[in-house]
Amino acid sequence: MQRIYIYKQFERFWHWTQAILVLFLAMTGFEVHDSIHLFGYENAVVYHRIAAWMLLGLIVFSIFWHVTTGEWRQYIPSFSKLSAQIRYYTIGMFKGEAHPTHKTARNKLNPLQAVTYLGFKLVMAPLIVVTGMVYMFYRTIDANDMVVVSEIPLAWIAWLHTFGAYLLMMFVVIHVYMTTTGSTPLSNIKAMLTGYEELEPVDENSIIKNKEAHEA
Amino acid sequence: MKKVILPAALLLVLLILAVHLFHRPELPNLSHLQLQQQFSVKPVASVDHTQFEQLQKAFATPQDVTEACIDCHNERHKEVMASSHWNWERISYVEGRGIERMGKQNVINNFCIGTSSNEQSCAKCHIGFGMSNNLFDFNNARNVDCMVCHDHSEAYIKGTSAAGYPDRSVNLSQVAQSVGRPGNINCGACHFSGGGGNNVKHGDLEMALLEADRSVDVHMAANGINMTCVDCHEAENHKMKGTLYSVSSTHVNRLQCSDCHSTTPHNDRMLDVHTGKIACQTCHIPEYAKVNATKMAWRWSEAGHLKDGEPYSVMDSMGREVYLSIKGSFEWASNVKPEYVWFNGHATHYILGDEVDTIPLQVNRLLGAANDRDSKIYPVKVHRGDQIYDPNTKMLIQPKLWSDAKGDSAFWQDLDWHEAATAGMLEVGLPYSGEYEFIPTEMYWPVNHMVSPKAESLSCAECHTRDNGRLAGLTDFYLPGRDRHAGIDILGKLMIFGALIGVMIHAMARFIMAIRNKEIESEDINY
């Protein structure tokens, strides 16, 4: 085992800020949906909007970071070991088998994670962001020269946005649970907090080579 | 060291950012302050009518006073005679009807029904003299009553059932010398007591406004800005600004809150965008009839009962008339929460002779819908009751109610519906089959006055709430917080609880397997 720096400073900042914002947005959002009562309807609406803008800002930064650092490649799904990964979570881990993939700084997501996070970034986040923006600028009026988005029924926008919220909550539940499947139940969370994780030393070059060879 | 300073600095920046974003001190509302300043300065009369020789004499008839007025104000009578206060009708284009003459002369209300055949009594609130029947000459300027609106002596009152003439006790000379800009009591003499008593009709216009405090009406409050009716209802050249859809029908000459307050008065974008779909009154008049009760129902069908062979009346514990043999039974209410409707500024009315097409009949119908971009949600007082109706002609009946003597077919004298219907319909020139019954009727009164202080206006959650919100009755649009669609919450719960249960089963399985595996391992170690 070796202590390896795997999550960069920005990555950790981004991850935890996003986590807080998503949970805060869920609390305020479900209050707007009148499922819970925490801040009062008026405050919930205002806070939800502020937090939404903060999340949008964070998303812009994170996209910039992913693009400029090339970290976006982490999310390219490799399907070769996907079934092995699924087999591990459903059967293998109960038998005490080892992880079928190795976590390294340059390949820190297992195939299942890569697919899930890609789905998060390409489906869930856009769904909730786009419907949220339309919701935010939804005006059925022209009295105040506001943007008019009256062609799409608000009921549909609200349905999709709420659906997105439920998807995200489901993701949070599974995501938090999956953090316990590391070498110890808390090792993954510790790594996301400190950046360092105890990992099997692996020759990264060989893995990358293998991966490239396989994809070719 | 760097490890501590950097996150601490970041945290501090975030904290400052959060304080900046979440703490919103109230900014001064400059346009509001400007309005307060504007209406703090009260108009001062530019002339003193006591000084005019023409008025320093005894007047034999009220018409003589009018002539004295016209002597100087020699064009004003024409303006007055063009107004609906005088004509009791206006010509307008009404949706679904075309060009129509409509007004108190031919529309039906849900209280004393209509003026036709009852002019002698109803004309107490006509700005003219001598409207004793339907032959009133609307072109005779001598009959314009200037005093009823302009009297400042507070001594002018119209006589009861006197065809619009002043009471005989009135000192016309005193009144004529007192005239000036109409005060609240001038407007209120009629508009507070329509329907036969204080606050009977409107619900938001009543005597209490003469000395209201701010919780009753922020505009007219004696301890507030103390505005008068005509401060808003400007009447340049006797064209009164403002319409009420109990008799009006078109979106012209309307008086809107936004005329002074603009459509973005809140210093808060979230509230301002509401003004596109929500009328100001909806949030700012949480209830009407705040001081004295208003009539909510009037059932003519119960009129005519006798006790010991005599007409009688019944009072409730609050001293309010709830039954009167000549009128039927009433319901009263105070501090009433309005009902809410979509309204685009156009209304249609039941006009004498129309065929009744729905039961209950809406004697006036406020037009509008959620998907109509000109519609906003307005608060209304809905007055419900029943009225006499001819089942064969399918028309409402205009009964003759008033007469000064028995045996003249008037219901209020003889309590005979058949006679009253025959006489009334004869006068308006409409058929009456000889059969009558009573059908339920509704009348819609937009609530515009009794604006509450800011702190008492509706909170968001009074509408944005799942059950029993203020707008529970308006179901033709999606209202966040109230509505949810197509099982989204069931689906969502399935997703979340499905995930939770799945995760728990998985965890359990791991736990059990770990124990088993450990047992094997421990045996290995023991070995």
Image: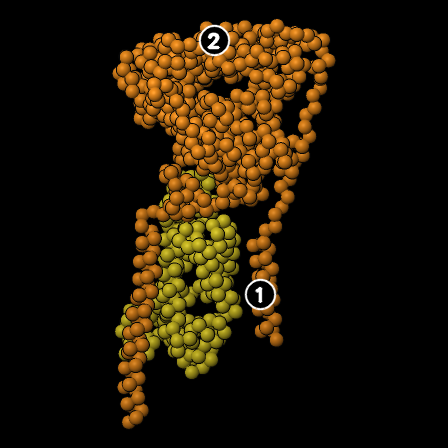
Chain colours: A yellow, B orange
Can you see residue B325? Answer: yes
The x, y position of residue B395, in whole percent, is 32, 17
Closer-to-camera residue (B282/B443): B443
Q: Which residue is mark 2?
A: B132
Residue type at tag 1: Leu
Residue B441 in which image quadrant:
top left
Give the answer, above or below, for where A195 lies relative to B154.
below
> Chain under label 2?
B
The x, y position of residue B422, in whole percent, is 33, 11
Closer-to-camera residue (A110/B81): B81
The x, y position of residue A63, in whole percent, is 48, 59
Compare marks 1 and 2 and give the one earlier in the sequence.
1
Q: CA distance from mark 1 to mark 2?
A: 83 Å
Residue A171 in which image quadrant:
bottom left
Query: Could you tell me which secondary element the residue under label 1 belongs to?
Result: helix
Closer-to-camera residue (A162/B225): B225
- Residue at the spot 42% in from the left edge and 81% down from the top edge: A201
In the image as oriented, which residue stretches furthest toward the front? B308
Residue type at tag 2: Ser
In the image as oriented, which residue stretches furthest toward the bottom? B527
Q: Quadrant of the N terminus of chain B?
A: bottom right
Closer-to-camera residue (B234/A46): B234
Residue B11: image tag? 1
- Residue at the spot 45% in from the left edge and 29% down from the top edge: B320
Q: Left of B281 or right of it: where is B232?
A: right
